[in-house]
Image (cartoon, rainbow, N blue to C red):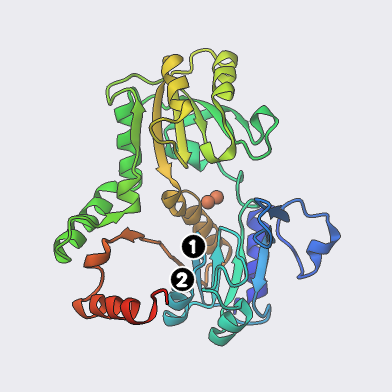
Amino acid sequence: MTLVKDVLTALDDLTNGRCLKSPYDWASGKNPWVVTKSSSIPGKAIVEMPGLVWGDPEKPVRKIAVMMTMTESAIELAAATGVDAMIAHHPIGDASNSGGVLLKYYLGLYGLACFELHEAFHGLHPGIPWLHGHKPYFATVNYGGIPGNIVYVGDVFPEIHTLGDMIARLDCLMNASSDEKMLTLERSHRCCDKIEETSVAARAKILVGSLDSPMKKVVHIFPHCGFTPEHLEKIVCENPGIDTLIASISRVYPGHPLIEKAEELGLNFVCGNSHAMEIFENGVPLANALKNHLPDVEVVIFRERMTSVPLDLIGSQEIREYGSRIAGEYLHRK
Ligand SMILES: [Fe+2]
Ligand SMILES: [Fe+2]
């Protein structure tokens, strides 16, 4: 019988020992993967504690759910489908990742354990460049001396000749046509063409260049990590032959100075996978690793599907009337 503590051992093994081994291990200050993330907003910081966040180490685990971000929907889905342990990639904040209520009460009520594994998982595999069709010969996690500013420089795979080839590869790997079809079906079923969905709205996109623009050597950045136009100028200078800038996880929108700089340097600029695709980039490999370490445990993936719906078309006619009545009767200024 697999226990919660065995899941912790599996996570520790697959990260080569990066997890916290006991609830008090963080206090030693020796685990570099215990990191505080803060924008200096009072009370909003989070401490990443790779490993078991909540749960009885001796409790049996028959089913594990791997997800990117734990939410109240994830907790409800886990409880309703017989999940014993949730493994979230993104750090878990008490109450913020549990629908505003305390983890101990909510997960305690449902008998769920939860684990987190974020920065301790990053950098363990070369999957993200591979998905984007290149093999890095240079990689750093602090370009320009900025911690977390991950940058790759790589040669594209021989079968990729153009931006169109790279986008077709990503679309195929990410099953983009299936997501488009789901959105078409939903729009049609709900009689609303204005429904939007992340994986379609934020799919791969060319910002500079065209589908037939040649590509051979790329610089691959993550714009939310602090990469600047000056960094772009520098890295192109250091790596002659770069013809394409790829941004993934996050991206930039028209008017951003990186677009202007890419144009000035004669580079193509492509947005690859958005953060909504990280469940495939990191979640699926993590789930497979767990399955390898714990072959008797059932592993499922919790995939989010976020949609945008106009207010006047949300839900049933009755719920629209309910929303309007409650707002009108109770939620107005006196
Ligand atoms: Fe990540
Ligand atoms: Fe992420």
Q: Which residue lies at the image location 49% right of the left edge and 36% below the top edge?
A: 129
What number is the disc on residue 74?
Answer: 2
Q: Residue furthest front?
A: 334
Q: Residues within 10 Å of mark 1 (few under 14, many from 20)?
A: many
Where 39 falls versus 53 (above or below)?
Answer: above
Residue 66: x, y in percent? 50, 64
Closer to the chain start, of discs 2 and 1, is 1
What number is the disc on residue 127?
Answer: none
CA gap between label 2 and label 1 equals 8 Å
Q: Which residue lies at the image location 38% right of the left edge and 81% below the top edge?
A: 330
Residue 47: x, y in percent? 70, 59
Q: Is residue 1 left or right of residue 285?
A: right
Work out whether residue 297 can be spotted.
yes
Work out whether residue 129 or residue 318 is closer to the camera in this orientation and state it. 318
Q: Which amino acid type is shown beneath numbered disc 2? A: Ala
Residue at the spot of label 1: 67
